[in-house]
Amino acid sequence: MSGLAALLANHNPPSVYQWHSAAPVPDVEHAVEHAGWCFRYLDGWTVEDRSTFLKAVAGALDLADVESVDALSAALGEIDCGDHGLVLLWDGWSPLARADGAAFDDAIEAFRQRAHRAGAQKLAVILRGDGPELDLPELPIKH
C-alpha cells in the first residue's frame, strides 16, 4: 500500500509529510476525493516570502485573506470537509524554504499543530518534491 493510500485509509495519521511521487495532480486529486477526503493544491513554485505564501495558501484553501500565520492557524480550524478530512498537496515548497526559512518553519509548525489537534477534523499536508532536508516523515511511494 502506498503512503498516500495508507493515509487515506487512516493507517498513517494526519500530519505534515514529505512525498517524492511524480503522480500527476489530477490523479492525486482523484485518489483523495475517491477516498472521501477534500483535496486542495498549493503551487508554491513562485512563493519566496511570507506575504506571498499567505496569499497563495489562502487561495488554495478557499480562505479569506490571511495576514499572518496566526490567522492561518485560526482559519485552518474552520475548514469543513465533512466526515473525512483535508489533504493539501504542496508542490514547490522548496523556494519558500530556501528564500524565507523563518516563514517556511512557521507555516510547517502551523500545519503540524493543526494536524495534531485532538478532536479537530483531519488535516494532512503533503510537501511533494525535493528541497532542503526536513525533519518530516516520508510518505513512501509504491514501487
Image (spheres, grey):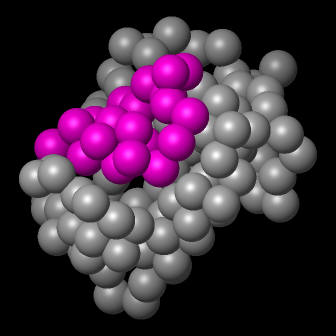
Q: Quadrant of the N terminus?
A: top right
Compared to residue 26, the image places residue 66 above or below, namely: below
- Quarter-wise, where is residue 129 in the image? top right
Residue 46 seen in the figure: yes
Q: Quadrant of the C terminus?
A: top right
In percent of width and height, residue 10 lies at: 50, 60
**In the displayed structure image, the side of residue 126 where residue 132 appears, left or right:** right
Foreground residue among 30 and 95: 95
**In the displayed structure image, the side of residue 82 where residue 36 appears, left or right:** right
In percent of width and height, residue 74 lies at: 26, 76
Compared to residue 48, the image places residue 143 above or below, namely: above
In percent of width and height, residue 75 lies at: 22, 67
Work out which residue is located at the far bottom of the displayed protein and give it. 118
Report if residue 25 lies within the magenta region: no
Foreground residue among 28 and 114: 114
Residue at point 70% right, 52% down? 101
Compared to residue 48, the image places residue 104 above or below, namely: below
Residue 38 seen in the figure: no
Work out which residue is located at the far right of the displayed protein and give it. 133
Q: Which residues are magenta?
A: 41-62
Report if residue 48 lies within the magenta region: yes
**In the displayed structure image, the side of residue 2 where residue 123 appears, left or right:** left
Residue at point 54% right, 21% down? 45
In percent of width and height, residue 69 lies at: 40, 67
Residue at point 65% right, 60% down? 102
Foreground residue among 58 and 137: 58
Residue at point 79% right, 32% down? 131
